Image (tube, rainbow, N blue to C red):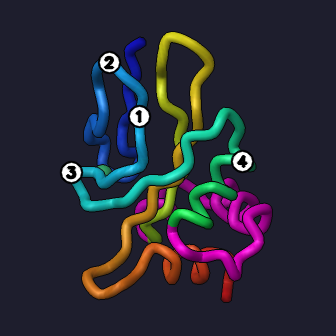
Amino acid sequence: MSARLECPLCGQVVVDGTGDIVAGVCHGCGARYEGGEGDAPGSVAAAVAGFGADDLDAREVLDAVFRLTPAQSAERGVSITSDTRDDFYRWWLFVRAGESGEPADVLRQVVGR
Ligand SMILES: [Zn+2]
């Protein structure tokens, strides 16, 4: 199987090769990505847990992320994207935290907490 994932925040190809994609860090901009489920709601729920933001409602995060314009995504450092692979694609939530910030805090700001 081959899979490819591009960072939606900086355009860097994060994964391109054989084997499955696991959560990790973009070496272009330092964003962390989590998710990897076959649908966007499931992936955001997995990402919210992976980022330690269990206090947030994953559906609220999903709505907020999908409402962001590309410019707002870049500014806030949050974006959702799908990978490309031989079979059905999976979704990934990318979060770029500031120097001292945590991805969970970035997500809290996006939903207005
Ligand atoms: Zn990146």
Provide the secondary structure element on which disc 2 rests.
strand
- Residue for badge 1: 21
Residue 46 x %, y %: 63, 55
Residue at horizontal 69 percent and vertical 58 percent from the top: 45
Q: In which quarter of the image is the N terminus?
A: top left
Reply yes or no: does residue 13 show up in magenta.
Answer: no
Q: Earlier in the sequence, mark 2 or mark 4?
A: 2
Q: Which of marks 3 and 1 is nearer the N terminus?
A: 1
Q: Earlier in the sequence, mark 3 or mark 2?
A: 2
Q: Confirm if mark 1 falls within 8 A of ligand 1.
A: no
**Disc ID at residue 28:** 3
Q: Which amino acid does label 4 sit on?
A: Gly
Q: In which quarter of the image is residue 44?
A: bottom right
Q: Is residue 93 left or right of residue 31?
A: right
- Residue for badge 2: 18
Query: In front here: 7 or 19?
Result: 19
**Disc ID at residue 42:** 4
Q: In which quarter of the image is residue 47?
A: bottom right
